[in-house]
Amino acid sequence: MERIGVVGLGLMGTALVRRLRAAGFEVKGYDVDAQKRERVVQEGAGAVASLAELAAQCTTIMLAVFNTEQVEAVVEGENGLLISRAQTGPRQTFICTSTCDPGRIAALSARIEPRADYIEMPVSGTSGQVAAGDGVGLVAGKQPAIDAVQSVLDAVCPKRQYLGAVGNGGKAKLAVNLVLGLNRGAIAEGLVFAEEMGLEPVAFLEVLRNSAAYSQVMDIKGPLMARREFQTPVSRVDQSYKDFALMLEYARALGQQLPFAEVYAELLRDCVEHGEAQWDNAAILAAIARRRGRPAGDVADY
């Protein structure tokens, strides 16, 4: 079996491991959190204790870390994958599923090109959707490198869009996440409004699903919002907050205002400040519900 490495064993990394294992790949996983390494063994994968060990065992490595800084550190940091591998060894391929700064990732790809191939594949979809094979991969990079790992990409994301040069995948993911996040916010605000008017939220969600306002987000996040079930995440508040902060930073550099995104980011910050950073990002509803002009109780009272 071909051996594939996975760095970052959180929600998305675990979903990648499941997809790769189901496709018949041998998988080696690494995370700084020992408990996550232990959990991935329960998924039938192997765990390694360092990036150096992973670099020694795997030529193709998928990255599912939190942000751009972590990607840079994992790939070319002092103890990173590129430094840890002998320069005379086989060429490495990094497939990154993280949502990152497009410009910095394009620069990283150019820096490591003499020794390694970098493929962007941020994924549109929750970790649950990815595990089920329903995530959409936003692929960017050089075509020969992509062709060489076609079986890996097929295993993880049967549905993909090719976007050209490295950097374009991240740009597309930021724009997709902007629309997706605002969609979540609109659903949450509608549910809060309906409940304040006396409508039962679970029943009203079905009205929304059968209305002209329908979107797929209602199927994925709507039940969590209607039932106020945020504590078991499939995509977290802090991840969404990181993505929206990156969108706004990138937009400022372009001289473009994103007024709806600014409001949404403020709502996410409210969730973080209320200790909800690790909750599912459907908890945006909690931030909206707190804007009542009267004291709010705990989330069960919203």
Image (cartoon, helix red, strand yellow):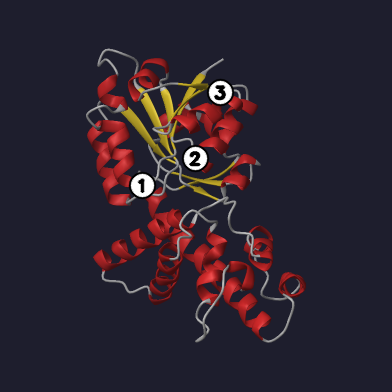
The tag earlier along the polypeptide, 1 or 2, is 2
Residue at 62% x, 22% y is 24
Q: Amino acid at mark 3?
A: Ala
Determine contact: label 1, label 3, CB under 8 Å. no
Gap between marks 1 and 3, in whole Å?
Answer: 24 Å
Q: Amino acid at mark 2?
A: Gly
Left or right of 186 in this view: 98: left
Give the residue pinned by disc 1.
Answer: 67
> Foreground: 186 or 150?
186
Kindly state the secondary structure of the residue where label 1 is placed: loop
As helix, strand or loop, the secondary structure at mark 2 comes to loop
Disc ID at residue 45: 3
Q: Is residue 139 above or below residue 171?
A: above
Labelled pair 1, 2 in contact (Cβ < 8 Å)? no
Badge 3 local density, few (<14 within 10 Å), some, or many (20+)? many
- The residue depicted at 65 percent of the width and 28 percent of the height is 22
Give the mark nearest the N terminus, 3 or 2. 2
Give amino acid for label 1. Asn
Per the image, the residue denoted by label 2 is 10
Per the model, the C-alpha gap separating discs 1 and 2 is: 13 Å
Quarter where residue 66 is shown: top left
Within 10 Å of disc 1 (Cα), the crowding (few <14, some 14-19, many 20+) is some
Q: Residue furthest top?
A: 88
Quarter occupied by the C terminus: bottom right
